[in-house]
Image (cartoon, rainbow, N blue to C red):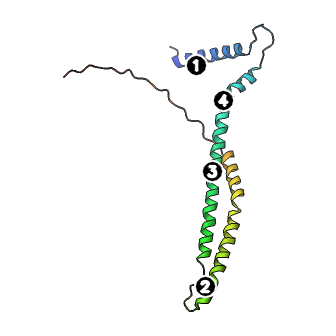
Amino acid sequence: MSDPHETLRETNARLQARIDELETKPDDGGEPIVTTETANTAKALPERAVHEFTRFSRALLVASVEHLKVSAEAIDVFAKEASNFSTNTTESMPVMFASIPRSFTTGVVKALDRALDAPSRAVEQFYKSYTAPQPPPAVVAPVVHTPVVHAKVTI
């Protein structure tokens, strides 16, 4: 007894070949309008467009998050430097107050230096994410509709 799945596969393959033949065959019986390769490429375009858009969106999101990370690092550098002024209790008050502007200036300069890393790091993360191997698309199981039985209930 033959395997019903194998018979179904053979039938599907035969029908797909016939569809491909009819899609590329002109009505007048002359040369095909497009080659099978062109027809197959055209069929794959919508799926490829979705795939490329998904890759681009993911890479753009990763790059945006990287920009936020660099901004947070810059703020952290500023906060550490700005709070690094002299708190030595043996120093006089004028000396302590004189160190505050220096600490703030150092913090601003270091924060700006760190912030200037944002564009290059964002582009680097975009490239890494865009060129990373993508998982295959998820196969969605068909929805099976179950008939609903309505019963009249009287009390």
| Looking at the image, residue 151 lies above or below residue 123 | above
Question: SS for tag 3?
Answer: helix
The C terminus lies in quadrant: top left
Q: Nearer the viewer, residue 38 or 103?
A: 103
The residue mark sitting in front, 2 or 3, is: 2
Q: Residue at x 65, y 73 (%)?
A: 107
Left or right: where 114 falls relative to 92:
right
Of marks 2 and 3, which one's residue comes earlier in the chain?
3
* Image marks 2 and 1: residues in contact by CB distance under 8 Å: no
Disc 1 to disc 4, C-alpha distance: 25 Å
Callout 4: SS: helix
Q: CA distance from mark 2 to mark 3?
A: 42 Å
Q: Residue at x 54, y 32 (%)?
A: 139
Q: What residue does disc 1 label?
A: 9
Label of residue 141 in the image: none
Measured as percent of width and height from the top left, residue 75 is found at 61, 66
Q: Percent position (x, y) of residue 114?
A: 68, 65
Q: Looking at the rendering, which quadrant does residue 131 occupy? A: top right
Q: Which quarter of the figure has residue 72?
A: bottom right
92 up-or-down from 102: above or below:
below
SS category of the residue bearing label 1? helix
| Tag in front: 3 or 1 | 3
Q: Is residue 152 left or right of residue 95?
A: left
Q: Mark 4 and mark 1 in contact (Cβ < 8 Å)?
A: no
| Relative to 116, residue 134 above or below | above
Q: Which of the two labelled residues, at mark 1 and mark 4, occupies the earlier sequence position?
A: 1
**Residue on which the image places disc 4:** 46
Front position among marks 4 and 2: 2
Circle number at residue 62: 3
Mark identifier at residue 97: 2
